[in-house]
Amino acid sequence: MVIYEKKYDVIDLETGRLDPLIFTDEEVYREELDKIFGRAWVMIGHDTLVPNRNDFFHTYIGEDPVILTRDANGKLHAFLNVCRHRGARVVRADIGNAPNFMCAYHGWTYSNQGDLEFVPGEDEAYYRDIDKEELRLVEAKVETYAGIVFATWDKGAPTLEAFLGDARWYLDMTFNRLDGGTEAFGPIKWIEPVNWKTAVDNCSDNYHVPTTHLSAILVGTQMQGLPRLTHQKQFESENKHIFINGHSITVRPLEKPDQARQIHGVTEENRHLFEDFYRSTFAEAEKRLGSFRAGGLQLGNHSIFPNGVLGFRLAHPRGPLETEFWHFALVEKDLPEDLKSSLKRASGNYNGVTGLFEQDDMDNWRGVTRGSRGSLARAYGQRLSMGVGHEGRNPDLPGIVSERYVSENNQRHFYRRWEEFMNADSWTDIPLEPITANFEGAATIKGTE
Ligand code: FES
Ligand SMILES: [Fe+2]
């Protein structure tokens, strides 16, 4: 038997040792763009950002600029925003409505179905010797999950349903709860001097919360009328920490189905209004998700591989030492307007660029990124050993479930997933956990059909 050495061997699942080179190295970064962002299903937008025919929204897959557009027939497309002539951008606006896109360099014009429709001088300058069919805009595959748009460049990629796998069983509790679906507001955009992965793995770091966010917690818990969060409470928490196919999930058990979910924007004053909303929508949610998912659990912090952080929010890579964050607020369409605005405001106030929590977090991610640059940092490595051996299967919850809420199991497996992508020649070498969860209820990957 020939044993091939793995090119990337950066995480030891037994000791939790992680090689910090992955946070700083230019060559590793270039390869991530190909092997991770060039292959994975990447979140790029939301249905409600392009509600009408001919709407477009400018977005990214990794560093590649992408036009997300709804054509005249209502079909979604994702095109590389690079002119096939000399590579200039064909769309320069962030958002708009247009049936076709004219490159401002020499005037090549494409339809919003990707066809190259017009080339100035086609007869004269090109002597009719140009294959317009071959020079269409480069197009990614597009699929949606409950209104969230994902795209992949890789024609060999599995379906989005297989890519999300059983993670969707949990994600449904937030993104697929009601017939009306969700709507996206934003984004707030900003750049931080951090490696993109530091923000992704942090979504499962329940260890840092009482330390890093102490002052934010003191303010927040006072507003919410809740007792203060301590380390001890985190260690004893009944919440769960779960990993599936690269996606990291946390969930909280609910004591009663109409309990206001623990989200930014719920205050002591408005909690009863949220409870009224959950009470009045419970039957609908139960029909969609079954009673356990509708009223027994709440999705907590989570990340969607590769760069979805805390829901529909994106960490776009911009070099090994820089990340562009796009913060969207995603709310249920049927939520009463005053509760919607409360969630929207709080979402930015906690996790926007000047967000109470975001400021604490970015300081840590900057520290981890900068600290990884020295040679001694590389020699010693990082230690993600918390809870090794204390994870397994749970009859009620799909995925790899940690014994405690505070664990580094999701982070270790996130880097193992990173290795799987980086060491694979194609999608056929990338393992996928089969879908085993019981998706009780009427909700589907499409949301409502
Ligand atoms: S680069 Fe677009 S028309 Fe020349
Ligand atoms: Fe945090």
Image (spheres, rainbow, N blue to C red):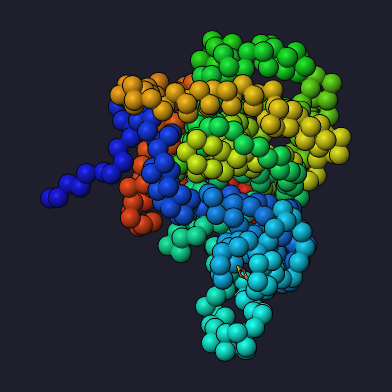
- Count of marks overlaid on the render: 0
Picture residue at 64% right of the left edge, 24% below the top:
359
Query: With 417 as the anchor, is 193 left or right in this view?
Result: right
Decide: is 124 above or below 160.
below
Question: In this orientation, which residue lies closer to the viewer: 353 or 269?
Answer: 353
Image quarter where ligand 1 lies: bottom right
At which x and y percent is residue 7? 28, 44
Residue lying at the far front in this picture: please name it.
Answer: 125
Residue at the limit of the structure toward the left, as seen here: 1
Q: Is residue 112 left or right of residue 386?
A: right
Q: Which residue occupies 66% across, 37% down?
A: 190
- What residue lies at 30% left-to-right and 24% top-to-bottom? 379
Q: Nearer the viewer, residue 293 or 267?
A: 267
Out of 333 and 422, give the one closest to the viewer.
422
In the image: residue 240, left or right of residue 313: left
Nearer the observer, 118 or 35? 118
Give residue 251's position: percent from left, percent from top. 57, 30
Q: Quadrant of the C terminus?
A: bottom right
Q: Residue visible at 65% across and 41% down?
A: 326
Image quarter of residue 216: top right
| Res 48 seen here | yes
Q: Is residue 198 left or right of residue 264?
A: left
Does residue 393 appear anywhere in the picture? Answer: no
Q: Quadrant of residue 67?
A: bottom right
Residue 13 percent location from the top left of the image: 32, 30
Locate residue 132, reporting x and y percent.
57, 80
